[in-house]
Image (cartoon, helix red, strand yellow):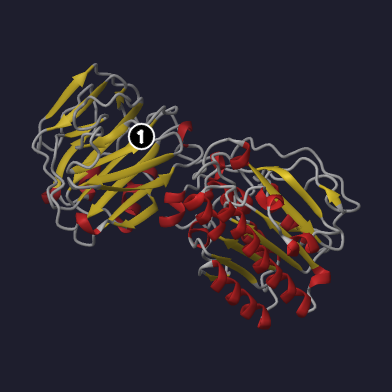
Amino acid sequence: MKKNNSYIYKHVVVLGVDGAGNFFNRTPTPNMDRIFANGATNYNVLTAIPTISAECWGSMLLGVTPEVHRRTNGIVSSIPYDVDSPFPSLFREIRAAYPNAELASFCCWNPINYGIIENNLGVYEDTAGDDELTDKICAYLEDHDPMMLFVQFDWVDGAGHGHGYGTKEHLDRITVTDRLIGRIHEMYVKRGFIDDTLFIVTADHGGFGHSHGGVTDDEKIVFWGAAGKTVRAGTIGDMVIRDNAAVCLYALGVEQPQTWTARVPDGLFTNFTDGERPVFTSLPTKTAHRTTDAKPAPQQPVISLLDAGKLCAYLPFENTDYRDASGNTAVTAHGKQYFPNGFLGTGYKLDDGCLTLDNIIPGKESFSVSFWFKTGGVAGDPSIFANQDRSSGNNPGFCFYIRPHLLRMTFGWGEGDWGFDVPLPLDYTDGWMHIIASVDRTANTSTVYLDFKRAAQISMRGALVDYDLTSLPFTIGQDGTRAHPTQLSAVIDEFVLTKEVIDDDRAAALRAYYLDN
């Protein structure tokens, strides 16, 4: 973060209307007509793809595409945004530039506050339905002077899902929301802020039929409008939704991060000319152990750090051997066997084969899996380890699988299934990544560590509390049937299965073992 010479505005307001797309011009919006009479508007802004809330709000606040920020609806609902992410939110950049500034976010859909805005910034946050939310915002503005105010209204999207996008009910709700926008604008007038305020209204996505997520124009094209003392009246040129983040920082005199691919649209402000859109090329720093070279194994095996009485299996894959070095279980190989370089010595390549561990019955007990993992990328959603039938999904058991940008852990109890997503590091295809998945049946939590850092800890669905997770054989590289159509292409090493719960301290000990020796 760097400040420019001075800020242009003392206040920035972004009012986002979920699901409104560019439907604003198909229904009466007298308040917006008044607010943007001398402002700049664009009814042809391209939002993020896929046109889903987390992906779109994430791009709007983080200045990058969904392929980079990795926010999904499931992730933002359950995993806080990484406070050290190389892709900071606009709130984090403003806080760094102005440590004492008041910052506020009011969202009907609270996962934005939880999973897109960093939780260590002192941002004032609140949530409620649209009408009550507006009451709260107006009450807040009576006594507060926020430099940055972000608002997300949600009921327009609800009307779209319920009645259809573009229907009378959907359009009527936009008109109702226009009145809420007018109330907030009037508070800025009342407080004497409006002359030093950049006032923005936009949408995350639209919809087609009763849904969204696709690439029809009604889903991917949205409205964006700005009013302020230096805004050039008229129609804004080329713009995508992540540019909203760049506009907010520019208005407050803050240089945008080098990792963002947002820009201020040309012609939006007087005396401003845009440059080329930034192109993301690589992370600022490369993860040190993303190597493809094998390291020599320490004298003591990793299982010396773990409770021997709870150890189920240890597969070091040395000397072209896939057997369990602990002697606790038999291992059966299926398909062809390959032993390329591992993280330590040799590893085991899962390409057209898999392994099953005999007599491994997690039942109702806790268990943890720890291993090194290397892949150049995946297609589809192959299983890393599982004891479920993926075609059924809700049969008793679990599955830990990978998609191109995330890991997913699912559990079934015979009458339903539940799971959660964990975003993968951007550089995970560059070499070795360490993964820990720990299931604590006493605390009823499931935790995933990536590169020894806790990436997610989720309270498991109540139906799983007393359920036996035993189904098919514990399988590495396939689902429990060994017949899932998507095969994992990866190399694994140092595979450990234990009934011990691996926590933060144990993960730190594993990190020291592997990386400090």
Residue sticking out furthest to the front: 168
Quadrant where the C terminus sits is: top left
Residue at left offset 78%, top offset 60%: 33
Q: Secondary structure at mark 1?
A: strand
404 is higher (above) or lower (below) than 450: above
The location of residue 47, given as percent across then percent down, is 63, 43
Q: Is residue 155 left or right of residue 22?
A: left
Residue type, numbered disc 1? Phe
Q: Nearer the viewer, residue 84 or 204?
A: 204
Other-residue count near label 1 (Cα within 10 Å), few / some / many at <14 / 14–19 / ≥20:
many
Out of 347 and 153, give the one closest to the viewer: 153
Task: Specify whether residue 117 is in view.
Answer: no
Residue furthest to the top in view is 336
Residue at the (87%, 50%) spot, across then down: 272
**Quarter-wise, where is residue 390 in the image?**
top left
Q: Which residue is mark 1?
A: 373
Above or below, comparing residue 225 to residue 409 in the picture: below
Toward the bottom, the furthest residue is 143
At a point 57% along the width and 39% down the height, the residue shown is 49
Count every numbered label the image shows and give the total.
Answer: 1
Q: As displayed, is residue 75 above or below residue 51?
A: below
Report x, y in % for residue 128: 50, 70
Residue 404 in the figure: left or right of residue 298: right
The N terminus - image quarter: bottom right
Q: Position of residue 103 (x, y in %)?
A: 64, 69
Residue at the spot 8% in from the left edge and 37% down from the top edge: 359
Observer able to see residue 441: yes
Q: Say which of 268 and 67 sits in front.
A: 268
Q: Is residue 20 left or right of residue 243?
A: left
Measuring from the top left, give residue 258's x and y in whole percent: 68, 46
